[in-house]
Image (tube, grey):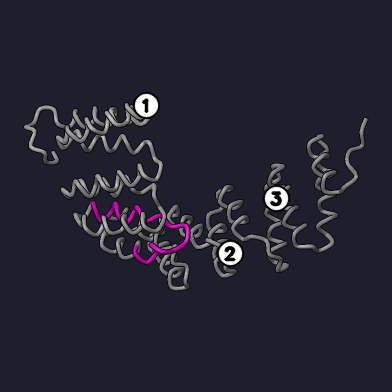
């Protein structure tokens, strides 16, 4: 019978997989006793993975107390999973103080779950004040969910240029508030900045505002950028707004070019557009 790998880290995992859990933990503790921060973190992770949660708590606490770069948020997660909400909030508060990435987001979530909405809002605002402008997106969702829409718009605008922040929630909220021109500006700016997947939202917003030619131009731009599914939007708009000559010309061109996939998308969209116009006069105006 094999005695397992010689490397102590691999051997610890092998021991655990073999059901020799106490030996695995002992080996990991021996490695962590050398004082290396990464080994202490690894011990805690292994204990948690192996189901020894209380011991994992202790290992994380030891690492944090010793000043190693152990993520406080992991400790908070362990506390939260064990139902120890106050301890989880305290650990996440320490993570914010240690400037761990997006720890403020985790702390705000914990506070919301604990029905401490005012404290969660304060966390978002403190994060923004500290330069974490992406927190504006989370604050915007938070405020919008509570009916504080104008404040939400202001919060979204703070975050709009932050890395990893999606601009569409701001556009969607502006549309909901009847501020279509501002929504269109948000979508158009995002598309110009390289977020081509927002073209459908831009086209829909333009159509709702009665700017059909501009909406069609956006769809044709998507097609020019090799998005064959955009033909579905083109067919929809042309059929819905009774532009039958253009629809026929487009379908004929695609058929003659042998582009049957694009033709299928075009006609599917046209069918949807036709259904919108059923039962009302054909005026060329949006329903």
Local packing at callout 3 (Cα closer than 10 Å; few below 14, some 14-19, many 20+) is: some
Label 3 sits on a secondary structure element that is: helix
- Residue 144 spot, x, y in % from top left: 31, 56
The quarter of the image holding the C terminus is top left
Rendered residue at 41%/41% (across/down):
226
Residue at the spot of label 2:
100
219 relative position to 283: left or right = right
Label 1 sits on a secondary structure element that is: helix
- Residue 273 spot, x, y in % from top left: 21, 32
Q: Looking at the rendered structure, which numbered label has been put on residue 45?
A: 3
Magenta-tinted stretch: 157-175
147 relative position to 130: left or right = left
Q: Earlier in the sequence, mark 3 or mark 2?
A: 3
The answer to the question of whether label 3 and label 2 lie on touching residues, with beta carbons closer than 8 A, is no
User: In the image, is residue 266 above or below residue 77?
Assistant: above
Residue 5: which quarter of the image? top right
245 relative position to 146: left or right = left
Q: Nearer the viewer, mark 2 or mark 1?
A: 1
Q: Nearer the viewer, mark 1 or mark 3?
A: 1
Q: Looking at the rendered structure, which numbered label has been put on residue 260?
A: 1
Q: Nearer the viewer, mark 3 or mark 2?
A: 2
- Residue 32 spot, x, y in % from top left: 81, 57
Rendered residue at 84%/62% (across/down):
34
Local packing at callout 1 (Cα closer than 10 Å; few below 14, some 14-19, many 20+) is: few
User: Residue at the front extreme?
Assistant: 256
Residue 157: which quarter of the image? bottom left
Rendered residue at 11%/38% (across/down):
284
The quarter of the image holding the N terminus is top right
Closest to the observer, 139 or 117: 139
């Amino acid at each position: 019978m094999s005695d397992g790998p010689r490397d102590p880290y691999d051997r610890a995992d092998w021991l655990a997989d073999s059901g020799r859990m106490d030996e695995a933990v002992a080996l990991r503790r021996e490695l962590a006793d050398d004082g290396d921060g990464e080994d202490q973190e690894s011990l805690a992770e292994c204990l948690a993975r192996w189901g020894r949660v209380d011991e994992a708590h202790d290992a994380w606490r030891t690492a944090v107390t010793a000043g190693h770069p152990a993520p406080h948020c992991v400790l908070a997660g362990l506390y939260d999973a064990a139902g120890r909400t106050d301890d989880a909030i305290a650990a996440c508060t320490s993570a914010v103080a240690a400037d761990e990435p997006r720890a403020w987001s985790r702390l705000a979530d914990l506070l919301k779950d604990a029905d401490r909405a005012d404290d969660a809002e304060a966390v978002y605002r403190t994060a923004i004040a500290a330069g974490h402008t992406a927190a504006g997106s989370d604050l915007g969702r938070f405020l919008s969910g509570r009916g504080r829409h104008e404040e939400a718009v202001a919060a979204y605008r703070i975050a709009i240029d932050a890395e990893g922040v999606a601009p569409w929630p701001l556009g969607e909220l502006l549309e909901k508030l009847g501020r279509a021109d501002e929504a269109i500006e948000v979508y158009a700016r995002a598309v110009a900045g390289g977020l081509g997947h927002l073209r459908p939202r831009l086209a829909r917003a333009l159509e709702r505002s009665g700017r059909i030619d501009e909406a069609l131009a956006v769809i044709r731009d998507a097609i020019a950028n090799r998005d064959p599914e955009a033909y579905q939007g083109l067919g929809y708009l042309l059929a819905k707004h009774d532009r039958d000559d253009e629809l026929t010309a487009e379908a004929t061109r695609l058929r003659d070019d042998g582009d049957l996939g694009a033709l299928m998308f075009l006609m599917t969209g046209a069918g949807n557009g036709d259904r919108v116009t059923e039962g009302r006069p054909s005026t060329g105006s949006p329903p």
